Image (spheres, rainbow, N blue to C red):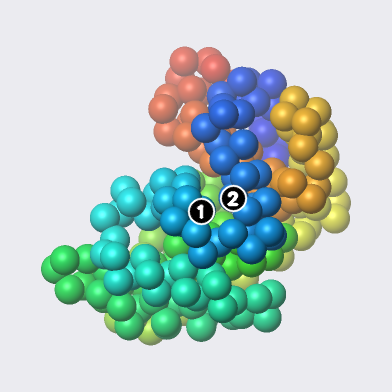
Amino acid sequence: MYTLVNNNIDTLLREINRKSHVLPYIELSNSFRQGDYQTNAFQKQYRDFYQLNAARLSDDFCSAYFELLNRGNRETSIEEIINSLYEIQSNAKGIHAVHFSFATKLIHTLDNNLPIYDRMVATFYFLPDIKQNWTKEKKIEVYLNSYKFLKSEYERVIDNNLLEISIDKFRKKFDVDDKQYSNCKVIDTLIWRYTALLKSGAICNRHIQYR
């Protein structure tokens, strides 16, 4: 998998938009470090960038979410975030849900060396599908096992330089250092773009080729 990413890194980088993805992420990270995360401007940009708005989450949910972000620190556990958010009605229908992806985005904001879980990452690593009829406890158990794998896998990728070529090219193209864009976040961005290209039929159209 990583060989394919490295072999096609130039194609991937052309598909990553500096203005719509790289710069907003850096701006959010800078604002958070500067303590601006309680402002309406930060929360609006965060909701747009991480697609809280697209999920049509309730205002109560978003308020609780940003309160957790406000109170959180590097010792905050993913389990604490998941369970706290579960108590809030997610939408106008009054649904309580396990919003694992949003929880990982929150904890990544607190510590950008932690991975983000989303459907693109899940697809790339063939992680288990979560069934809607599972209990809350079963969903969380499977999610946490996947997240444990992601953390150890990203560490392995970084420690063994499996994506060193791609990470270096990403940093040169977008002129970002590891404080602005951690290695973990670079990996996340590359996997997101790679999986999106595959889903759009890039292999069939020979935009990405096995070598």
Q: With respect to residue 30, does 206 lie above or below?
A: above
Q: CA distance from mark 2 to mark 1?
A: 7 Å
Quarter of the image that includes the N terminus: top right
Which residue is painted at 21% across and 72% down in the image?
95
Q: Secondary structure at mark 2?
A: helix
Residue 196 seen from this side: yes
Q: Are marks 2 and 1 in contact (CB under 8 Å)?
A: yes
Look at mark 1 in the image and give the residue it sits on: 42
User: Secondary structure beneath disc 1?
Assistant: helix
Q: Where is residue 147 drawn, in percent x and y? A: 57, 67
Is 129 on the left-hand or right-hand side of 31?
A: left
Answer above or below: position of 148 versus 26. below
Residue 62: image location, x then y, percent: 37, 66
Answer with left or right where residue 147 lies relative to residue 92: right
Q: Which mark is residue 28?
A: 2
Three-letter amino acid code at the position of disc 2: Leu
- The residue at the point 62 percent across, 45 percent down is 27
Please state the horizontal and vertical placement of residue 196, each as a whole percent of the image: 47, 34
Mark 2, residues whose alpha carbon is within 10 Å: few (<14), some, or many (≥20)? Answer: some
Q: Nearer the viewer, residue 38 or 86?
A: 38
Q: Amino acid at mark 1?
A: Phe
Query: Residue 60's x, y, as percent?
Result: 30, 71
Q: What quarter of the picture does the C terminus occupy?
A: top right
Residue 14 sits above or below residue 66 on the image: above
Tell me the mark number nearer the camera, choosing from 2 and 1. 1
